[in-house]
Every structure is written in C-alpha cells, then in structure tokens.
Amino acid sequence: MAEDYDSERRQALYQSSAKVLGIIWKRRWQVLKKELGSDADGSAADFVLKMEALLRQWEDGYIRDKRKLQYVAISPLSSGVITGSYEFQTALFDGEPYVEENPLCFYWTPEFIYRDIGADMQDFRDMVSGDVIRLREDEVEEMRRKYVFCHAYASMLFLDRIFKEIKKLPFWQRTAGTDVKVLYGTYMEKMVEIGKGEADAG
C-alpha cells in the first residue's frame, strides 16, 4: 500500500510540476527575451573582458609553442546547478574539446538569466501545493534542477550574440582567427556551434 501511495504521489508531483513549470517558464521567457539584447547587469561586458584575458594567456604561451587554437567550449556546469551558482566554464582547446585535462579556462555566470529562479520556485511551491499534499523540500529541489535547464536556451542565445560581437574585436581576430569554432553545450556531450553569422565577416 505504501508503494502504491508513493507511486501515486510521484505521478501527481510530475504531472502538476510539468504544468506549473510550463506556466512559470512561459512568463519568465517573456521577461528574458527582452533582456537578451541588452547588458543591463554587465554580464556581457564581464564575459568579453574575461575572454580577452584568456586569449592573451593563449597568445603569451601556446602560440609561442605553435599550438593553434581550434575550439572555444562553453559549458554550464552541473556543480553550478547543484550549488545555485549557475556557473559556466569557458575553455580553450587546440584539439578535440575536453581531451586536455587542464585547459586554459575561466568561470562566469549570466546572472540576469538565473536571478529569479528562487522567486519562481516559491511560486512553484504555492501553485503545486494544491495538488501535492505536504510538498517536501527535496521534491522542490528536484524540480528546481529540472527548471534550471529551461534557461539553457536563453543562455545560448545570449552567448551567441556576445560572440558575434567578440568576433569583430581586434583581440579575437589577432589571436583566434576565422577558423575557430565556438561550441556551447553540456560538458562532454553533444555541443552546438554559436557565434556564426554576419559578424564573422569582421
């Protein structure tokens, strides 16, 4: 009987959560898509400065060793989802991404994209509690981690725009060149090339 209750509870949790998180994300996306083209909190400017510093490190060391930059890989970190820091790693590679154990890299968070997750999850608690009795914190935490992944598309669009601008800048053209691929995706999994388009013409 207890197993049947647990199974029914899980089913109710997942069904209600899918509906509620869909409503909350639709509302959040309407806000975010208006902000993706701006830099109100300085996230884009901070990323550009960090990217320039990283390429200077490559230029100072790796080019001297005749190592040619081939990939920039940007990955949202699983640890950042767990801790709530929502950090991304940006790393440079001269061969296949992630083959090198200690690549040149930096860590960064597009804070405006993730800043309202806490408030959204409070709304989630209020909306789901009518369908799931005594909603537990571990259940809310499970759904928070699922909800975080809704933000991946927004962060990809933001980084795509940033790199279209970065590719116009002298430090990129001097160090990276035109054949470097910028990849976005989860660590060690299939990635998507970003930053392509008219800005590549420089």
Image (tube, grey):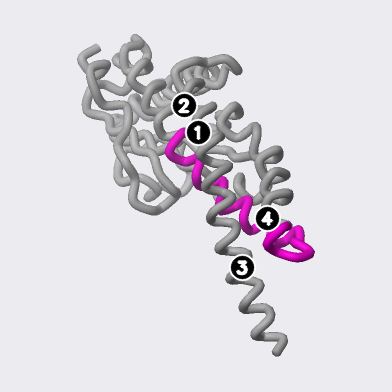
Q: CA distance from mark 1 to mark 3?
A: 25 Å
Do the residues bearing badges 1 and 2 touch, measured as CB atoms within 8 Å? Answer: yes
Q: Is residue 11 above or below residue 178?
A: below
Point 27% across, 30% down: residue:
180
Circle 3 residue: 12
Q: Is residue 67 visible?
A: no
Separation of marks 1 and 4 at Cα, in angstroms: 20 Å
In the image: residue 48, left or right of residue 40: left
Element carrying mark 4: helix
Mark 4 sits on what residue?
128
The residue labelled by disc 1 is 29
- In this picture, which residue range is highlighted in magenta? 130-154
- Which residue lies at the image location 64% right of the left edge and 58% below the top edge? 142
Indicate the position of residue 76 as horizontal and vertical percent values: 50, 42
Residues marked 1 and 4 touching at CB (< 8 Å)? no
User: Could you tell me the amino acid type at mark 3?
Assistant: Ala
Give the overall secondary structure of the magenta segment: helix
Residue 167: percent from left, percent from top: 32, 18
Quarter placement of the N terminus:
bottom right
From the image, state whether disc 1 or disc 4 is nearer to you: 4
Cβ–Cβ under 8 Å for marks 3 and 4: no
Vertical side of 72 occupied by 139: above or below: below
Amino acid found under the numbered disc labelled 2: Lys
